[in-house]
Image (spheres, grey):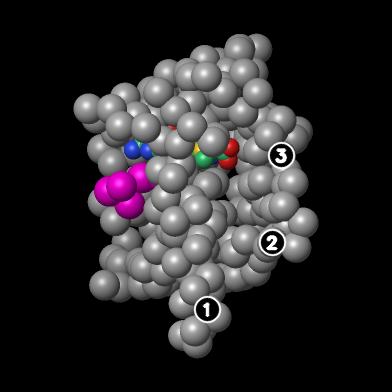
């Protein structure tokens, strides 16, 4: 990660350049860095027969948090734009036909059937067109379907300390192509009926004393299919 996100011609090339060298050990490092993933899966709790989609699914690690419940889903789609990480996902899920690994851009991907549940885990902050991605995610969902997000956030306050913290975290994560923006949470709340919003902090690996902000969000697409804007 210390090498930073790099500069390729396209977003897909930049992702591949960043992740290819670390794809084999991506999961072990992220276990300590990406907090709240298991909690998000517990909040989602899709019922039997669901179609579940993770956008920006990387190595497919999060699908494991569903455990045996995954066997009751109609199917599970893991969508990502980075071939290096998808190779890991294909290896991981090779024996589970319910899990489909799909190389596609979350901005434009559309499943064949509408989903019961769409979620992002630390992916929205790596998607430059995050607003278009959220519109697309909503369009994939059935009316009443669930949209879940766990991701890095920013302090909410407006005092000098909070403003300095925001600047620090923006620069820190910006180096790796992770773009923090309070508008993510605000937009999620506008687009869906909010069920859960937890904004909190967690320890950073190897950096005692530093706590990074992250949030968990669960929203429901309205039953009429309309979104509040
Ligand atoms: C920090 S990783 C998170 C991976 C996984 N969700 C996890 O929790 O470990 C961000 C992921 O978003 C993917 N990504 C970024 N932009 C994308 C896009 N436009 N379409 C699909 N995937 C994208 C990256 O390739 C990467 O796998």
Q: Is residue 178 left or right of residue 92?
A: left
Q: Is residue 196 left or right of residue 209?
A: left
Q: Secondary structure at mark 3?
A: helix
Q: Residue at x 72, y 52 (%)?
A: 207
Q: Position of residue 19 (x, y in %)?
A: 48, 26
Q: Nearer the viewer, residue 160 or 25?
A: 160
Q: Nearer the viewer, mark 2 or mark 3?
A: 2
Q: Nearer the viewer, mark 3 or mark 1?
A: 1
Sequence-earlier tag: 3 or 1? 3
Q: Nearer the viewer, residue 39 or 220?
A: 39
Magenta stretch: give its range.
124-130
Residue where numbered disc 3 is placed: 31
Residue where numbered disc 1 is placed: 162
- Beta carbon of the mark 2 residue lies under 8 A of ligand 1: no
Q: Position of residue 203 (x, y in %)?
A: 73, 57
* Distance between mark 2 and mark 1 Cα atoms: 14 Å
Using the image, tell me which numbered label, if any, was put on residue 134.
none
Q: Residue at x 75, y 33 (%)?
A: 68
Q: Residues within 10 Å of mark 2 (few under 14, many from 20)?
A: few
In the rendered image, the vertical position of residue 188 relative to residue 82, given as above or below = below
* Distance between mark 3 and mark 1 Cα atoms: 27 Å
Q: Are marks 2 and 1 in contact (CB under 8 Å)?
A: no
Q: Position of residue 36 (x, y in %)?
A: 67, 54
The single residue placed furthest to the left in the displayed view is: 9
Q: Is residue 151 left or right of residue 37?
A: left
Sequence-earlier tag: 2 or 1? 1
């Amino acid at each position: 990660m210390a090498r930073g996100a790099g500069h390729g011609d396209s977003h897909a090339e930049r992702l591949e350049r960043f992740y290819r060298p670390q794809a084999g050990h991506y999961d072990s490092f992220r276990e300590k860095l990406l907090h709240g993933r298991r909690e998000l899966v517990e909040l989602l709790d899709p019922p039997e027969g669901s179609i579940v989609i993770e956008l920006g699914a990387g190595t497919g690690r999060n699908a494991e948090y569903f455990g045996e419940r995954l066997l009751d889903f109609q199917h599970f789609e893991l969508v990502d734009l980075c071939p290096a990480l998808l190779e890991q996902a294909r290896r991981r899920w090779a024996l589970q036909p319910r899990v489909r690994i799909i190389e596609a851009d979350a901005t434009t991907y559309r499943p064949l059937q509408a989903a019961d549940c769409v979620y992002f885990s630390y992916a929205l902050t790596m998607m430059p067109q995050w607003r278009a991605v959220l519109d697309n995610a909503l369009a994939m969902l059935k009316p009443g379907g669930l949209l879940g997000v766990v991701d890095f956030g920013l302090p909410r306050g407006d005092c000098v300390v909070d403003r300095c913290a925001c600047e620090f975290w923006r620069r820190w994560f910006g180096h790796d192509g992770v773009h923090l923006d309070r508008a993510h949470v605000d937009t999620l709340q506008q687009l869906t009926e909010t069920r859960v919003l937890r904004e909190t902090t967690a320890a950073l690996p190897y950096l005692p004393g530093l706590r990074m902000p992250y949030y968990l969000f669960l929203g429901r697409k309205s039953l009429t299919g309309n979104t509040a804007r």
